[in-house]
């Protein structure tokens, strides 16, 4: 099939490389506001260059991958759907939840599929955890712990435009918790601090956070995030039930050092970047998108799914700033 790519920055170029390696993809059509980025991708992957999103849609593409700046996501999603082209768009749907809700409303009644990029849904460990929960082998759940620790903070310009750590980073944990457990979040309580880069504090954000989520069946989920984890990129989840407990991410590249006598685990080179940790998941995610394009499966991560994770991030952001529990219903009304 023929796939278009809008945006050839870090993640867009990574997606181009992944798509170029899929047997089901025969050709790529790329566009980026920076002509050099599009030209470099064309030379590297044998792609065709278009001078605008409209030109990509008109080039006979079967599907389009949106990896452009967040501000452009709503218009590009809707333009692709209007052109009848199935869409894969990196999260978030839009910069604000209000804009995201407008996108959802505009898509009502449309039959063109839209898939939002939450790659942990395609990681083998997270998929195995979901299967274990859904099969009932853990029994009823009582505790979930989810962790995302970055090796170093992103640049100041990125932080200033990110919407905050809950919307930018923790939202992956929130989506994973919903997806693995099959439950919704009812209430959150979040805390945070700054002991690192001054520019994060100056942006009104926190560099290290914790959030307690109460799920609709009473399960307690604890989410831990930080921009500072010198040992590497640490993504894990623990799921504890009344019959058994399991973990995602306990493998030899876990960026954690045991100080127990005689213990050599973990023994591998620690993960140091999200693309390194989730290379296989990104490939599986885009393979799934080609199946969506072919009509072989529905979208595995819809706009509705992405907005649900976004509401949790909104509630945590409000809780952090107002030092109180916040319900999801409250932020939806707001």
Image: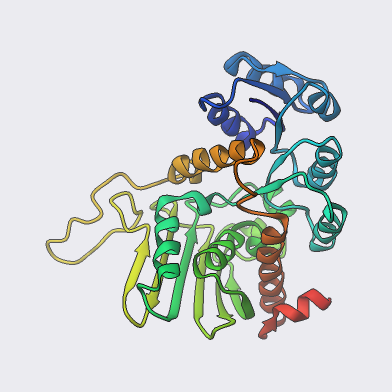
**Left or right of residue 158, residue 271 in this image:** left
Is 114 situated above or below 245? above
Q: Where is the N terminus found, in terms of image quarters? A: top right
Q: Using the image as rendered, state which of residue 29 and residue 9 is in the foreground.
A: 29
Q: Quadrant of residue 319?
A: bottom right
* Residue furthest front as drawn: 296
Q: Using the image as rendered, state which of residue 195 and residue 128 is in the foreground.
A: 128
What percent of the width, then of the height, locates residue 43? 62, 13
Residue 323 seen in the figure: no
Q: Residue at x 47, y 67 (%)?
A: 146
Q: Residue at x 79, y 74 (%)?
A: 332
Is 186 situated above or below 292? below
Colouring convention used in this rendered image of the protein: rainbow
Q: Quadrant of residue 192?
A: bottom right
Is 83 situated above or below 300? above
**Left or right of residue 152, residue 203 in this image:** right
Q: Using the image as rendered, state which of residue 265 and residue 289 is in the foreground.
A: 289
Q: Where is the C terminus found, in terms of image quarters? A: bottom right
What percent of the width, then of the height, locates residue 59? 79, 21
What percent of the width, then of the height, locates residue 266? 25, 54
């Amino acid at each position: 099939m023929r796939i278009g790519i809008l945006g050839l920055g870090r993640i867009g170029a990574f997606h181009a490389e992944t798509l170029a390696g899929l047997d089901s993809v025969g050709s790529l059509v790329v566009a980026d506001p920076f002509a050099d980025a599009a030209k470099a991708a064309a030379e590297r992957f044998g792609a065709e260059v278009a001078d605008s999103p409209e030109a990509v849609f008109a080039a006979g593409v079967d599907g389009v991958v949106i990896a452009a700046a967040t501000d452009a996501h709503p218009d590009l999603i809707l333009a692709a759907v209007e052109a009848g082209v199935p869409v894969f768009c990196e999260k978030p749907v839009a910069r604000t939840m209000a804009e995201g809700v407008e996108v959802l409303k505009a898509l009502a009644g449309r039959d063109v599929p839209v898939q939002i990029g939450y790659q942990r849904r395609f990681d083998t460990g997270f998929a195995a955890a979901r299967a274990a929960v859904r099969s009932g082998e853990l029994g009823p759940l009582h505790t979930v712990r989810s962790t995302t620790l970055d090796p170093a903070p992103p640049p100041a310009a990125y932080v200033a435009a990110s919407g905050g750590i809950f919307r930018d980073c923790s939202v992956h944990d929130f989506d994973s918790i919903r997806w693995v457990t099959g439950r919704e979040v009812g209430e959150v309580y979040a805390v945070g601090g700054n002991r690192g880069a001054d520019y994060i504090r100056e942006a009104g954000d926190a560099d290290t956070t914790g959030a307690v989520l109460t799920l609709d069946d009473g399960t307690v989920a604890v989410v831990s995030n930080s921009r500072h984890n010198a040992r590497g990129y640490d993504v894990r989840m623990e799921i504890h039930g009344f019959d058994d407990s399991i973990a995602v991410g306990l493998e030899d590249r876990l960026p954690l050092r045991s100080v127990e006598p005689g213990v050599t685990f973990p023994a591998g080179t620690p993960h140091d970047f999200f693309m390194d940790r989730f290379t296989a998941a990104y490939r599986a995610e885009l393979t799934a998108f080609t199946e969506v394009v072919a009509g072989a499966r529905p979208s595995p991560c819809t706009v509705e799914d992405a907005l649900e994770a976004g509401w949790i991030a909104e509630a945590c952001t409000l809780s952090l700033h107002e030092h109180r529990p916040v319900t999801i219903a409250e932020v939806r009304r707001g």
